[in-house]
């Protein structure tokens, strides 16, 4: 039980990678705040899955693009589990839509940045005052942040690149306080994200050009989040760790 007595906040914990992270952290003893934006039923399912694994969780609605909501999320965490946050997982994010440069307007670009990058900044700003030595932040970046993304993913890839850079900057600033900050850069993980935005044929192509010949699973990313959040990773900070089945960078 490596997270016994620890409190974790997982943004976008209502399904897929976020849900797998909540269940994994709880299965190792953490009390978990399951953040969601619109799907309360999904968030309740995550809470039930955590409880079935023997853990404690509460679902908290907050739109991570809104500073007041993020502050309320951290206030709700205090109410539920006390004044210390040990783990923050900035998982909420998404592609929103596939748009080329020609199709994108400034409003769309800014929203995708807000959802993936500004949200990470806001959650860190709100949570860090409750973090002490030994705490850890884990951010969800993406392979897209390294290679520019697939078709119509310019804004998303740019935002995830910003998450990688923010991870390094935060690691430098918070390292002297004993707070570690790392990120994952997943390749194609089979979730609702790709169900919505990536045709089956394109998913098959990516899987076939991946050395391990398949898409990843949410649970595999959750295992890496848990490792980076744990004391086993006590000398790792500022890292952007690839989890992509060996997919070559284009
Ligand atoms: P997903 O299935 O689309 O789930 C996204 C989660 O984020 C949901 O729980 C959703 O909750 C929440 N969310 C969305 N907008 C939000 C907002 N404004 N405020 C709070 N929560 C919000 O995505 P996923 O595939 O699990 O991906 C999770 C993370 O990994 C994302 O950051 C994604 O960019 C990153 N990632 C995924 C892949 C992949 O292949 N799947 C690859 C690289 C990186 P509601 O439904 O309640 O809105």
Image (spheres, helix red, strand yellow):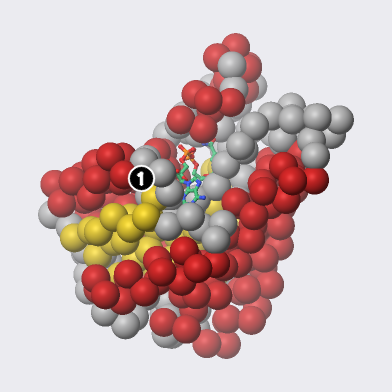
**Residue drawn at (32%, 69%) of the image:** 76
* Furthest residue in direction top, as rendered: 201
Tell me: residue 24, above or below residue 97: below
**Residue drawn at (24%, 65%) of the image:** 31
Which residue is denoted by mark 1 in the rendering?
Answer: 14
**Residue drawn at (24%, 41%) of the image:** 45
Compared across the picture, whether 185 is left or right of 64 comes to right
> Does the numbered disc 1 mark a residue whose Cβ is under 8 Å from ligand 1?
yes
Q: Position of residue 41 (x, y in %)?
A: 28, 40
* Furthest residue in direction bottom, as rendered: 176
Compared across the picture, whether 228 is left or right of 49 comes to right
For the image, the number of numbered tags is 1
Tell me: residue 201, above or below residue 214: above
Q: Position of residue 154 (x, y in %)?
A: 76, 39
Q: Residues within 10 Å of mark 1 (few under 14, many from 20)?
A: many
Can you say which quadrant of the picture contains the N terminus? bottom left
Q: Position of residue 133 (x, y in %)?
A: 43, 85
Q: Position of residue 10 (x, y in %)?
A: 40, 58
Compared across the picture, whether 26 is left or right of 148 comes to left
Secondary structure, mark 1, is: loop
Q: Is residue 146 visible?
A: no
Can you say which quadrant of the picture contains the C terminus? top right
Q: Nearer the viewer, residue 223 or 149?
A: 149
**Residue drawn at (34%, 80%) of the image:** 84
Tell me: residue 78, above or below residue 63: below
Tell me: residue 99, above or below residue 11: above
């Amino acid at each position: 039980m490596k997270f016994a007595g620890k409190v974790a906040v997982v943004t976008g914990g209502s399904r897929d990678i976020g849900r797998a992270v909540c269940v994994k952290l709880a299965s190792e003893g953490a009390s978990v705040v399951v953040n969601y934006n619109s799907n309360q039923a999904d968030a309740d399912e995550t809470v039930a899955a955590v409880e079935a694994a023997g853990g404690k969780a509460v679902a908290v609605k907050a739109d991570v693009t809104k500073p007041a909501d993020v502050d309320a999320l951290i206030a709700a965490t205090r109410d539920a589990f006390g004044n210390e946050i040990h783990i923050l997982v900035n998982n909420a994010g998404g592609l929103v839509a596939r748009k080329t440069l020609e199709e994108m307007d400034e409003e769309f670009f800014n929203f995708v940045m807000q959802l993936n990058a500004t949200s990470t900044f806001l959650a860190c700003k709100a949570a860090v005052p409750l973090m002490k030595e030994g705490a850890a932040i884990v951010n969800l970046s993406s392979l897209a942040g390294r290679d520019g993304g697939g078709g119509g993913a310019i804004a998303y890839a740019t935002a995830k690149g910003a998450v990688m850079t923010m991870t390094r900057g935060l690691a430098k600033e918070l390292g002297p306080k004993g707070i570690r900050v790392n990120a994952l850069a997943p390749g194609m993980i089979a979730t609702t994200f790709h169900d919505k935005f990536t045709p089956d044929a394109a998913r098959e192509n990516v899987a076939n050009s991946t050395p391990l010949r398949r898409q990843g699973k949410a649970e595999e990313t959750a295992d890496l989040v848990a490792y980076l959040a744990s004391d086993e990773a006590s000398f790792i900070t500022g890292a952007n760790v690839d989890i992509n089945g060996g997919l070559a960078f284009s």
